[in-house]
Image (cartoon, helix red, strand yellow):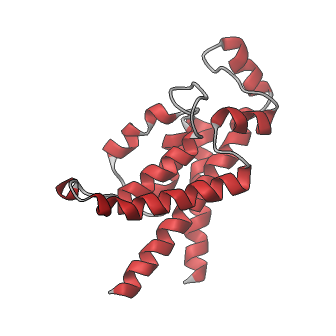
Amino acid sequence: METKRADILQKAFERGKKHELESGGCAQCCLAGIFEALDAEDEGVFRAATGFSDGVGLSGNGHCGALSGGVLAIGYFFGRPSDQFGDIKKQLKACILAKKLHDAFVEKYGTCRCTDLQTRLAGKFFNLYDPKEMEAALKAKLPEKCSSVVGETARMAVHIILEERDREALKK
């Protein structure tokens, strides 16, 4: 079982990283890696992740898009359903698990803010709307550096999801 789990975690890392290198859009790439590793699929959730790239809307002002993708995946698997929307307690599990991912991310990278993360990875924040800044980001190998963050965040999220699934299975 541990080999299978290790394979699933590695698949999440590899697929998230690959998607970021090929397609960009850190939140969607992380989410895609998670969904592929766990054999899940939801076009609506995938599309909803689009605007979380580079913080929010390529602004850098917000937390890392990969973290957003991981949190969306946690919500997909453990979030409060609409028929229980009035029960505030039903959101706690997803919130606790999302905080666990957030804390692991910050422990690993020292921040969750996109601007700070880019500065740590590549020496500065890049305004990706500016063609000169985009060129500089490519020269600084930002996509390669961010792809590792995406892959690692996908792995962290899958680890949390699998742990929670195991806990739920023991309760039954």
Q: Vertically, is 149 above or below 2?
A: above
Report the side of 84 relative to 7 (left or right).
Answer: left
Residue 49 against residue 86 in the figure, above or below: above
- Residue situated in front as seen by the camera: 24 or 100: 100
The residue at the point 34 percent across, 59 percent down is: 91
Q: Is residue 168 above or below residue 31?
A: below
Of all residues, the one furthest to the left in this rendering is 83
- Tell me the quarter of the image containing the N terminus: bottom right
- Residue 28 falls left or right of residue 88: right
Residue appearing at x 55%, y 40% in the figure: 65
Residue 162 at x, y percent in the picture: 49, 71
Q: Is residue 30 left or right of residue 145?
A: left
- Residue 93 can be seen, yes or no: yes
Q: Quadrant of residue 126?
A: top right
- Locate residue 44, reporting x and y percent: 31, 43
159 lies above or below 111: below
149, 60: nearer the viewer: 60
Tally of numbered discs: 0
Q: Quadrant of the C terminus?
A: bottom left
Looking at the image, the residue that sits furthest to the front is: 88
Identify which residue, 91 or 10, lies in the foreground. 91
Q: Residue 25 appears at what percent x and percent y?
A: 54, 35
Residue at image x 69%, y 35%?
143
145 to the left or right of 92:
right
Residue in view at x 33 percent, y 50 percent: 42
Based on the displayed image, in which of its 4 quarters is residue 39 positioned?
A: bottom left
